[in-house]
Image (tube, rainbow, N blue to C red):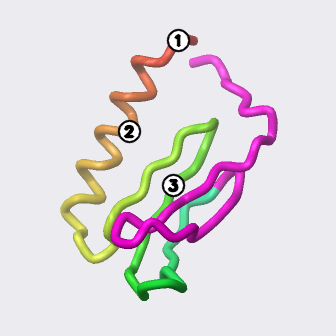
Amino acid sequence: MSSRTSGNKKRCVCCPICGGIVLKGTVTDSEHICRKCGAGVRAWVKDGVVIVYDPSDESREETTAHRLFAYLDTLPK
């Protein structure tokens, strides 16, 4: 797998509930609480790809990782 560079462009992670900006960054795998509505948000940002999901749904974390790797495999290398 070749490495893809994002050019250090910051990506925005928005709350899926209210749309408020939760985080701006280039790389992260972290949990946050939206300042606007208080919703829990888990964010994964790497190589220009942003994935946001509900941290309380543990079964979803496994399927999200599977979907992420399937998506990354489809990107041009």
Labelled disc at residue 5: none
Circle 2 sits in a helix, a strand or a loop, which is it?
helix
Confirm or deny contact between disc 2 and disc 3 (CB under 8 A): yes
> Mark 3 or mark 1: which comes first in sequence?
3
Label 3 CA crowd tier, 10 Å (few <14, some 14–19, many 20+): some
Q: Nearer the viewer, residue 63 or 9?
A: 9
The residue carrying mark 1 is 76
Q: Is residue 11 magenta?
A: yes
Magenta stretch, overall SS: loop
Which amino acid, mark 1? Pro
Q: Is residue 7 magenta?
A: yes
Q: Write down the region rendered in magenta.
A: 1-27
Point out residue 65 in the picture as x, y percentages from the top left corner. 35, 46
Circle 3 sits in a helix, a strand or a loop, which is it?
strand
Q: Nearer the viewer, residue 56 or 1?
A: 56
Q: Is residue 70 above or below residue 57?
A: above
Q: Is residue 47 above or below residue 33?
A: above
Label 1 CA crowd tier, 10 Å (few <14, some 14–19, many 20+): few
> Mark 2 or mark 3: which comes first in sequence?
3
The residue carrying mark 3 is 44
Which residue is situated farthest in the right direction here?
A: 8
The residue carrying mark 2 is 68
Circle 1 sits in a helix, a strand or a loop, which is it?
loop
At 37% across and 64% down in the image, what residue appears? 16
Which amino acid, mark 3? Trp
Q: Report the label total.
A: 3
Quadrant holding the N terminus: top right
At 49% across and 80% down in the image, what residue appears? 34
